[in-house]
Image: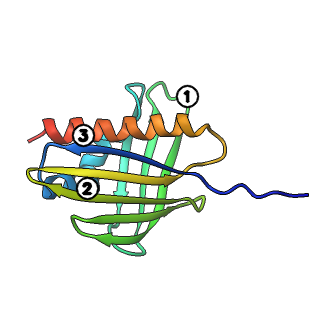
Amino acid sequence: METHNQTSRVTIQAVIQAPVEKVWTYWTEPEHITKWNQASETWYSPKSENDLRVGGKFVTRMEAKDGSVGFDFSGIYDVVKQHEEISYTLEDGRKVDITFTIQGDETKVVEIFDADSSHSIEMQQVGWQAILDNFKRYTEEVA
């Protein structure tokens, strides 16, 4: 008897000490994406392309600094509501939903994603949270 596993949804979040306009710009513009989109100091993103519209495609190249491995993180946008929400479908069919909530002079970013089946949920949550934490640091430190 075949069983089907239901996809687990994982939530990560951060409160960014910056207005939503800056948070949105740094989240969506390739020149900024390449500066924060890595889970650890041993990785980097050498290039990013972003067609930020419903039906538009994005791709960010992620590589180990030692050259041992790399991959394209890419998908198609399903929802784009400026300064509020972004949803997309990854190439493997998993869904990602991101909300941007104004909290005074701060912006709360909540990201909910479908876990993949090849890594533990805990590992994925830690990795995605590390990238979000890098985004927070970068956005708060860069003028």
Q: Considering the image in quadrants, where does the N terminus appear? A: bottom right
Q: Looking at this view, name the residue that lies furthest to the bottom.
A: 54
- Closer to the camera in the image, 122 or 27: 122
Q: Locate residue 45 relative to residue 27 in the image: left or right.
A: right
Q: Is residue 103 left or right of residue 5?
A: left
Q: Hey, which quadrant is residue 5 in on the image?
A: bottom right
Nearer the observer, 91 or 45: 91
**Residue under label 2:** 29
Q: Are marks 3 and 1 in contact (CB under 8 Å)?
A: no
Q: Which label lies toward us, 3 or 1?
A: 3
Could you tell whether 76 is left or right of 26 in the image? right
Check disc 2 and give the amino acid type.
Answer: Glu
| Residue on which disc 3 sits | 136
Q: Nearer the viewer, mark 2 or mark 3?
A: 3
Residue at 76% across, 58% down: 4
Crowd around label 2: few <14 · some 14–19 · many ≥20 (10 Å): some
Measured in 3D between alpha carbons, the distance from the residue under mark 2 to the one under mark 1, in whole angstroms, is 27 Å
